[in-house]
Amino acid sequence: MRLFIAVRLNEKMENALLDMQDAMKWKGVRGNYTRPENLHLTLAFIGEYPDPYHVKEVIESVAFEPFTIRLDGAGSFRGLWWAGVSAEPAGGGDPLRKLVKRMRHALADEGIPFDRKKFSPHITLVRRPDPADIAPPAPRGRDLSMRVDHISLMRSDRGKNGMIYTEL
């Protein structure tokens, strides 16, 4: 079973991201756009792992205090365009990065494999954009933030029309 740990987005945040995608489409950018129901912020990508209950136990064991994230710029790397995400500082630091660090340590302590690339908080908007030389538009709007009050374990399955993400 292909798994990842993520923050699911509220409707307001999702709509802001869809507006960014619409702006790209209006500029004539083609590519593999992330479907609205698949927009999320990945905290840890696990990949193939047979025991989602074990992963869920680890997630529940990690100390978690709700915090606020906001859309923060846009960019591109490795053939994808993304919207940046930042957390509002709380209690002496970045609560998003601290959560990811605790989550990854807990996964490692339990022997659960995960992608160890440096955490770069972003939400994928489009893969393989064409033309790729147009800069992705920055998020627009007055309040592009949301409260993160829970973390989700997600399952990823390949469907006939692309990936299907299901919260476990």
Image (spheres, rainbow, N blue to C red):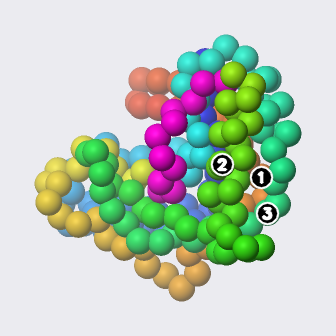
Pointer 3 residue = 66
From this view, report whether residue 129 is shown above or below residue 111. below
Q: Secondary structure at mark 1?
A: loop
Distance between the Cα atoms at labels 2 and 1?
16 Å
In the image, which residues are magenta? 112-123
**Which secondary structure type mostly characterizes the magenta part of the structure?**
loop
From this view, report whether residue 152 is shown above or below residue 162. below
Pointer 1 residue = 150
Pointer 2 residue = 101
The foreground one among 63 and 129 is 63
Residue 24 percent location from the top left of the image: 28, 63
Distance between the Cα atoms at labels 3 and 1?
7 Å
Q: Quadrant of residue 70?
A: bottom right
* Three-letter code for the amino acid on which mark 2 is drawn: Lys
* Three-letter code for the amino acid on which mark 3 is drawn: Pro
Q: Quadrant of residue 162?
A: top left
The foreground one among 42 and 113 is 113
Mark in the foreground, 3 or 2: 2
Q: Residue furthest top?
A: 50
Q: Is residue 118 left or right of residue 60?
A: left
From this view, report whether residue 162 is shown above or below residue 34. above
Sequence-first tag of 3 and 1: 3
**Callout 3: few (<14), some (14-19), or many (20+) C-alpha neighbours within 10 Å?**
few
Residue occupying image coordinates x 81% and y 44% = 62
The foreground one among 77 and 140 is 77
The foreground one among 111 and 30 is 111
Mark in the foreground, 2 or 1: 2
Residue occupying image coordinates x 72% and y 17% = 51
**Callout 2: few (<14), some (14-19), or many (20+) C-alpha neighbours within 10 Å?**
some
Q: Is residue 69 magenta?
A: no
**Callout 1: few (<14), some (14-19), or many (20+) C-alpha neighbours within 10 Å?**
few
